[in-house]
Each structure stands twice: as structure tokens, then as C-alpha cells.
Image (cartoon, grey):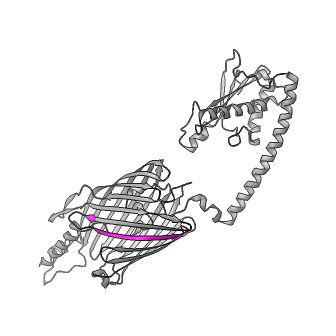
Amino acid sequence: MKRIFFIILLNFMFFGGFSQQIPLNNQYLVNSSSLIPAFSGYHGNIESFLTYRQSWLGIDGAPKTALLNVNGILAPSMGFGFTALTDKTGNYGQSFISATYSYHLSFGDNIALNAAISPLFYRNQLNLSSIQSYGTQLDPMLSNTDALSINAFDVGVSLGFCLNGLKIGVSVPQTIGMSFKFNEIGDNFKLRRHYFLYSSYEIITGDFSFQPSVVVRSTEKFTLNYAAGVKVKYKDRVWTNLGYGSDNSILLSVGVLSGSSLALNYSYEFGIAGLSSASLGTHEITLGFLIKPAQNHNSYATVFLPIESIVGEVDENLTNKVAMLDQQLKSERQERIAGDEKMQEKIDSLANLIGTGVVADNNNAPATQWVQRISTQSINFGLMNDVIFSSSFGELDKYSQKLRQDTELKIKILVYTDNQFSESVNKQLSHSRAKSVADYFLSKPGITPNQVFYEGMGSIDPVADNTTPEGREKNNRVEFLFNKKVF
């Protein structure tokens, strides 16, 4: 009476414990991190991909697979990934979720070593509700439970190498190979080690690119199987892939990138021999969505285009905004030039009156004790020059008014930069900007040269991390020292 139950159980143990526990799919055609987690975040974007696969259409109980992968940049040189997969074949179902931490060691543009670790939770289940016992008596094994299941934890590791258009990766999910009892019945269930090898190389010629690729899969005690193909892309927006698998299958795939953040890929596999040739083929569709784009990413590493290459295509309103901002910038530049000319006239006039330079070469006020320091980022200059933006005049006028009201009040201007250039360049630029601020104060009536001192500090004494744009912005600052407390 229990014979059918044990037959089903043995079949389950065979397929669950000794064959491919990780279902096959073709998402790697548009998302290589789904196969090699070490590539997660290498592109700099945050991306998501959802795949649905219906194998051997027309055969009852054929595998159905759903796969979700989200991956992206976590911090400079670090990435993350999340994968959830569910697969059902007849009464047998399996699923797993995994998280990935990846690290990317760069050696220049488009050259990097990548490594990742991916802990995972695995579950498989045999549904008994649709299994009937033969004979007049109900099998107690079937009446006491609706399903038999196993839960397990394991860890995967992966390595990757990128060199321009070349990508090579190795992944070993389920490295520990944990063993568990299946409801205390039968042999141990074991998570078999899987081995994945991926290699591709993209060749760009004009509007077209060609990307041959090879994927090799294996498990413990099983022979290798492979899939090889060539993907052809046109203007990085439309592509097709033709491939052949060692299981005597042919793969045809087509895809399109819509706008800037939506990718769609459809794959059809059909067999030319064996069981797969008796079905209507395998259908698979993948939908990719760009959650957060990088400002400038590695074009070889993702199906999505760099953000700067699609700005002009987003919408007409954006184009109009760019034109308006450009006109505003030109107008502000003309206004600044006119203001600079008037300021220079006042400076020249003042220099003729006092018979000396506008500001003494001596950057330190003799025997002066500075009792108050004020740091500000409201004083802005032109790119790599000492031209003060008109938006800064309001802040400067606040200090010049104090200097005019108190002739004994002295001020020292300190200008700092980030470390993006050599220290000699930073020192010269900060000195020139400090002098521009001093000249602005001295252009105001009532302020004398013995009240104003300045010094360019270069990139010394940073107040934030120079490796981030935010930190560099904070380090580009102006500080004012006063010999009296005035604010």
C-alpha cells in the first residue's frame, strides 16, 4: 500500500539530491550578475530583472521557473545583489533566496577583478495532496501530511574579471554542500555543488556590436553541459542572439531597450533531439528595469546606456530647460564681466590714490590675534578661475559693511580647495581667489588696505573626505578671520 509513496519519494530524492538543483535560464544574456554574482554593482547602476520561463510547452508537469534579480552599487568599489527563484515541476517544487556582497578592485578604465559571497536559503517540497493510494485503504503517509519539505542554508562564492569588452566569471553556489534528512525518511538530502563558468567578449564596429559567449555548467558527479552563442546588437538598443546547447537545443533570442530604463528580452529554445524535441519548445521572457542610473558607468557591464548618452532623447521639455539654463548662464556671465570691469576701475583708482599695491604682499597682519573664525561655502567662483559669482555678493557685502563701520576691524581671507589637482595648482588657484575677495572688499568706500589680508591655503586641512563629490564640495570653502568678535 505504501509502495507508490516510496516510489515517488525515491524519484524525489534522485531529482532533488543528485541532479541540477538550480534551474537553468537565460537571464544572463542581459544580466550577467544573475549567473556570476561577482559582477553585481560593477556597472554603477541599481537594476532589477524579472524572468519567467516555461519549459517543454505541451508536456504536462513541465518545469515553470520565475527568477527575480536586483543588483547595484553599494559604495565605491562595492556592490550588492538579491536573488529569489522558484521552480515547479509536476508535484515537486523548489525555491531559494540569496543575498550578495561584491567587491570590485579596479586597475583603470574597464579593468577590474571582482569577487562576491552569497549566503542563500534553499527549500524544496513535494506536494502530496494530488497523490492517491491504490487499494481500499488510505495510505496513512498520505493522510497525515499535504507536503514533505526540506529547508537548508548554504553559501555561494564567485569571481570575475573584466578587461574592456572581455568578461570571465566563475561561480560556485552551494559550496558547503549541506546534508539533511527528508522528514527522517530515506537517505540524506544534499545540496550539491554547482559550477558555472561564463565568458563573453564584445566587439564594437560602428553601430553594431558582436558578443560571442560561452556558459559551462556542471554539478558533482555529473558531466559538463554548455551553451554557446553570439549576440548581435544595433546601436545598443536592439539585439538578437543565436545559440546552441550541448543538450541538442537551439536558442533564439531577441531584445530591445525602450527609452532609458526598460529592457525586454524574449528567448525561445527548441530541441533537435531527445525529450525536448517532442515538446513545443521552451519560452522565456525577461523584463529589466533601471532603478537608479550611474552618472558614468562601464558600458560593457550593463544592457542600459550611460545616462549622458540619453539626455537629449528623454523629452522635449528637458531640451527646452537646457536651452533656458544655457541662456541664463550666458546672461549671468555677461553681467559678471560688466561688474568685473567696474570693479577693476575702482581698484585702479584706489591704487593710484594710495600709491602702493591694493593688498600688501604680506599675507599676515603684524601682531594680530584672530579671535573669530567663520567658514562659508556661499562664496562661489568660476570653474578653475578666480571670478566671483554675483550670487556671492550678498554674503561679501555683509562683511564689508562691518569693515566700513569699524576702521580698527581687520579681516583675513583664507581660501581652500579640494585635492583634485597638484598642490602647486591648488595653491595658485586658492591664492588668486583669495586676492579676488580682498579686491572686492577694497573696492568698497571706507575700507583701507591695512584692514584686509588674504592667503591661499590650497588643499591642506580638509574638513571632509576628498574621495566623494560631497566631500570635495565641502573642502572648497572660504574662511574669514577677525581680530574682533563681530558676529
Query: In the drawing, does residue 188 fall left or right of residue 34?
Result: left
The spot of residue 44 in percent (x, y) is 50, 54
**Would residue 237 be counted in the magenta stretch?**
yes
How many marks can you see? Answer: 0
- Residue 225's image quarter? bottom left
Task: Tell me which segment is drawn in magenta.
Answer: 218-239
Q: Which quadrant of the figure contains the C terminus? A: top right
Foreground of the two, 24 or 184: 24
**Residue appearing at x 22%, y 70% in the figure:** 15
**Would residue 436 be counted in the magenta stretch?**
no
The spot of residue 174 in percent (x, y) is 28, 58
Foreground of the two, 72 or 370: 72
The spot of residue 359 in percent (x, y) is 77, 25
Q: Which quadrant of the figure contains the N terminus? A: bottom left
Query: In the drawing, does residue 93 fall left or right of residue 41?
Result: left
* Magenta: main secondary structure: strand
The extreme top residue here reads: 367
Please tell me whether residue 34 is drawn above or below residue 457 in the rendered image.
Answer: below
- Residue 405's image quarter? top right
The spot of residue 247 in percent (x, y) is 29, 75
Please tell me whether residue 345 is drawn above or below residue 130 in the rendered image.
Answer: above
Please tell me whether residue 463 is drawn above or below residue 264 in the rendered image.
Answer: above
- Residue 481's image quarter? top right
Please tell me whether residue 90 is drawn above or below residue 449 in the rendered image.
Answer: below
- Regarding residue 24, the answer to whether it shows in the image is no
- Regarding residue 227, the answer to whether it shows in the image is yes
The extreme front residue here reads: 205
**Residue appearing at x 34%, y 68% in the figure:** 86
Query: In the drawing, does residue 292 fall left or right of residue 16?
Result: right
